[in-house]
Image (spheres, rainbow, N blue to C red):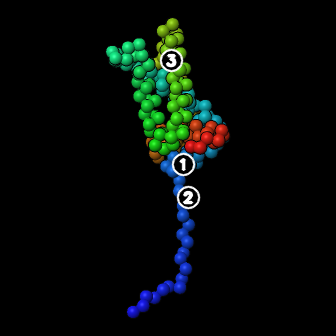
Amino acid sequence: MAKQHSSTSKRTIPVKENLRPVEVYFNRLNKSHQHPTNRLLHFICVPLMLFGLLAITWAIPFPYIKFLGQYNGFLNWASFIIAFSVYYTLKSSPNLSYTLLLVLFGLSYGVSKLAEWQLAGGPPLIWVGTAIFALSWLGQYIGGKIEGNGSSFDDDKKLVLYTPIWVLHFLAKRIGLKY
């Protein structure tokens, strides 16, 4: 008995664009950040929020580790924030992760200068960090109100972790860096 062949041609099924997970998160963030003022506030406030977070965690006393010697002050709780951020984003976008590392090093330099200022009689680092963090959070909150949408972070908490590299990806696009 011979096989019967169908004379119908194969149907073409439209294939969804294959997006990397990082692009899916960026698309979700783009949808909830359409208003130019909201985006501008995020471009300003996200780096400031990172700066404030680093300052707060830098100010938390870290145990003395003898083998670090003179470098003891450079390993602190902020170091773990930096390591986690870079590791978490490394899987999604290595280029943006490296860029984030450079940005975090720059912010850490600024925080270290604030810590020196505190030692010279300036305001406590934890207060400065808290004020910067709170003001930048307020700026993002105002941006969300301007946008008119509820917080996109209510649906997925991971979006909070992707927001810094979402901001960086606009810079990467502008300078022609593949992410």
How far is disc 3 from disc 1 in space, using C-alphas?
34 Å
- Residue picked out by circle 1: 23
Report helix, strand or loop for mark 3.
helix
Q: Position of residue 113 (x, y in %)?
A: 53, 15
The residue drawn where x is 41% and y is 21% is 75
The residue drawn where x is 55% and y is 80% is 9
Q: Amino acid at mark 3?
A: Ser
- Residue picked out by circle 2: 17
Mark 1 or 2, nearer chain start = 2
Q: Amino acid at mark 2?
A: Glu
How far is disc 3 from disc 2 in space, using C-alphas?
45 Å
Which residue occupies the extreme bottom position in the image? Answer: 1
Side (left or right) of 171 relative to 82: right
Which residue occupies the extreme top position in the image? Answer: 121
The residue drawn where x is 48% and y is 39% is 89
Q: Amino acid at mark 1?
A: Glu
